[in-house]
Image (cartoon, helix red, strand yellow):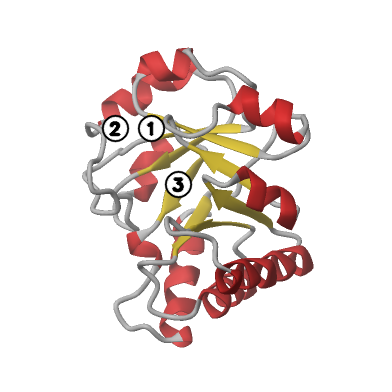
Amino acid sequence: MALELPRYYPILSTDKLGVPLIEAAGTMLECGVRILQIRHKGPYTRAIYEQAAAVAELCKQADARLIINDRADIAAMLGAGVHVGQDDLPPDAIRRAFGPDMFLGFSTHNPEQILAVAGEPDYIALGPIFATGSKENPDPVVGLENLKAWRPLWNGPLVAIGGITRANAPDVIAAGADSVAVIGDAMPAEATPAALRKRTREWIEILQ
């Protein structure tokens, strides 16, 4: 049976959260989110690790999948999945080091990278679909037409990422994405649990 990813895939980037990480994750899970990624670009201090461990427990209780960005070692310690990019450990090396059962996502940005994927990741991410402010040096924008044209190059689940909002997400799904990963538009301007709950429910309703 082919893996089915939830359509809404929020990424909790620790440098962009208006509410504490554990509170943000708990609120999203209560609303029905079933996959979450923790994106932390700094060192994994004890405090950050303990927060991630608390989120991992919340995900376990909610029967949701937790993904750790970049750090396969942290993911293994938490019993989580990992998402890596082109400059990180390659998927085949992660499989050798951490075993074939670790859930693994891999970033791609063009057709050459899609065709070169090795190590059988559970899904690939493609982006940025639109212009994004989440990276200092983003790759060239993919666009909807390229998403549609390149989709047949990969026969597994594909997550679209980069500049995706509630307004354009339906078009991204229609162009071939199985799921949309969202950083900026996942978090409301008003940094309160109530506002985050409302935003999350909007996302889930849009992508039903």
Image coordinates for residue 205, horizontal then vertical, percent: 49, 63
What secondary structure is found at the residue carrying circle 2? helix
Q: Which residue is mark 3?
A: 180
Q: In the image, what residue type sits under mark 3? A: Val
Q: In the image, what residue type sits under mark 1? A: Ala
CA–CA distance between discs 2 and 3? 13 Å
Left or right? Give the position of 82 relative to 144: right
Q: Nearer the viewer, mark 1 or mark 3?
A: 3
Q: Residue at x 32, y 83 (%)?
A: 190
Q: Residue at x 59, y 27 (%)?
A: 91
Q: Residue at x 64, y 58 (%)?
A: 34
The correct choice, above or below, for 178 with respect to 37 in the image is above
Image coordinates for residue 114, horizontal then vertical, percent: 45, 19
What secondary structure is found at the residue carrying circle 3? strand
Image coordinates for residue 171, horizontal then vertical, percent: 34, 42
The disc placed on residue 175 is 1
What secondary structure is found at the residue carrying circle 1? loop
Judge by depth and name the residue closer to the eye, 191 or 202. Answer: 191
Quarter of the image where one finds residue 184: bottom left
Judge by depth and name the residue closer to the eye, 45 or 93. Answer: 45
Quick one: label 1 or label 3, which is nearer the N terminus?
1
Quarter of the image where one finds residue 137: top left
Quick one: label 2 or label 3, which is nearer the N terminus?
2
Q: Which residue is mark 2?
A: 144
The correct choice, above or below, for 187 with respect to 166 in the image is below
